[in-house]
Image (cartoon, grey):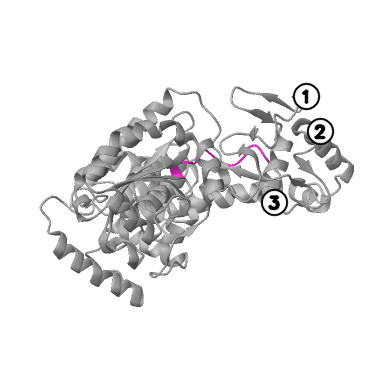
Amino acid sequence: MSDPWVALPSGADPAERTRALRRAHAAFAADGRVVPSVRAVVAESWRRSARARVSPECAPRVELPDRDLADYRAAHPLARVMPVVRELVGTVAADGEHLLAVCDAGGRLLWVEGHGGTRRRAEALGFVPGARWAESVMGTNAPGTATALDRPVQVFGAEHFSRRVHPWTCAAAPLHDPHSGRLLGAVDITGGDGLAHPHSLAFVQAVARAAEAQLALLPAEAVPGAAGTSLGAASVGVLRVLGRDEAEWRPGAAAGDGGGGGGAGGRTGAGLRLSRRHSEIMLLLARHPQGLGGDELLVALYEDEDVSPVTLRAELSRLRALLGPDTLLSRPYRLAGAVETDYGWVAERLALGAVSAAVRGYPGPLLPGSAAPEITRLRRRLADELRAALIARGDAGLLGEWAYSPWGEDDPEVWRALARTLPAERRAPALARVRTLDADLGLAGVPHRPPGRLDARRVPSSP
């Protein structure tokens, strides 16, 4: 099969494939065994679904009742491109007895439209606006898996993790904010076996590109309800802390604009730039919505145990003046509502096994100039988990992105893994880099490498 994201190659027999997939699904449900005939993308999704304790008998749940749904999707950035999406997909869906669906980055269905009879059958299934079809809830399915991996994907019949979805076929492609690159959701086309064709995946990809092109013509705006933000809590803003020493704070409607800039931070074209210490405090409070006491913050922020609580209170007072009194609360210190962070988004994708999405959403280390003990720990943990996932995945493209980044260019482990994945005729530059790094680190000629290292001389010569 030339394209691993397509469920059926041209000319394949859908009935024969259906029988094989049902046997494979039954085997996995019984003992976790994946037979070789299952596509790698599906096998990996099944394993993630099992780790998330999704049942093959699962049913979707409606997270957004009608009133909340109307308000949420009216404010969602994808509402601005729905006319374009409907124009491109509407006739195809109606004539082919298919459905058009658009979900947010958390896998919540916002719009489900199309052929009346198909829509009624989908309603019985729970494929309705307001229902959550994230992979972590419903297992393998096109909109949920496309948002989990941040990749276009087609899912056919019994490739779906939930047995109740086995009669259906779907293809979905992710949608991004063209201004920030942020995942906004996915566009999906759902129906019967007639969609089990490579053209359906190419079609939704083209629709996604057209929608993103339309968004690029519109002014940038905040992304409400993005992945990682609880819809049950008031959102006070978005905090960007990866790949920068000073965080960027984008207050939401609940937070206002935070008042004057003062000397602790300054306005940028996109948001409010925080000082290093305020950046650290905001991240820690965002990660602990229940709040932190003064002693806990002192331990997390300062290496010097002799720092006075008065110093911390002064920093918090300045931060409160910057954000506004209704955003930063005390006793314990906490933020007034949910705060989404790019750190949290990457960590969530990684936990779901969406390594590609996590790496491509990682613009650099967490607050790299910070020496705060807790920030240092978080920075190392995320980078180490990303590296380990990359090396385990063995994808030459992803390894190359990391190896040629400022934070990966001196990482011998990643260069060794890259050399291992490249075909023999393209391996020489990576091997040369391995030798240079070994010489710089004093490892050249060392006969025994630490566990996990790949000796450049022992890289297999075959692709």
Foreground label between 1 and 3: 3
* Mark 2 closeness class: few <14, some 14–19, many ≥20 residues within 10 Å: some
N-term-proximal mark, 3 vs 2: 3
Q: Which residue is the site of mark 2?
A: 318
Q: Nearer the viewer, residue 297 or 381?
A: 297
Q: CA distance from mark 3 to mark 2?
A: 20 Å
* Mark 1 closeness class: few <14, some 14–19, many ≥20 residues within 10 Å: few
Question: Secondary structure beneath disc 1?
Answer: loop
Residue drawn at (81%, 51%), measured in percent from left and top?
A: 332
Query: Is residue 368 a member of the stretch shown in magenta?
Result: yes
Q: Which residue is the site of mark 1?
A: 262
- Residue 35 appears anywhere in the view: no
Q: Nearer the viewer, residue 49 or 273?
A: 49
Q: Which residue is the site of mark 3?
A: 289
Q: Looking at numbered disc 3 in the image, what kind of residue is underneath it?
A: Pro
User: Seen in the image, is 375 located left or right of residue 223?
Assistant: right
User: Seen in the image, is 135 located left or right of residue 99?
Assistant: right
| Magenta stretch in the rendered image | 359-370
* Mark 3 closeness class: few <14, some 14–19, many ≥20 residues within 10 Å: some
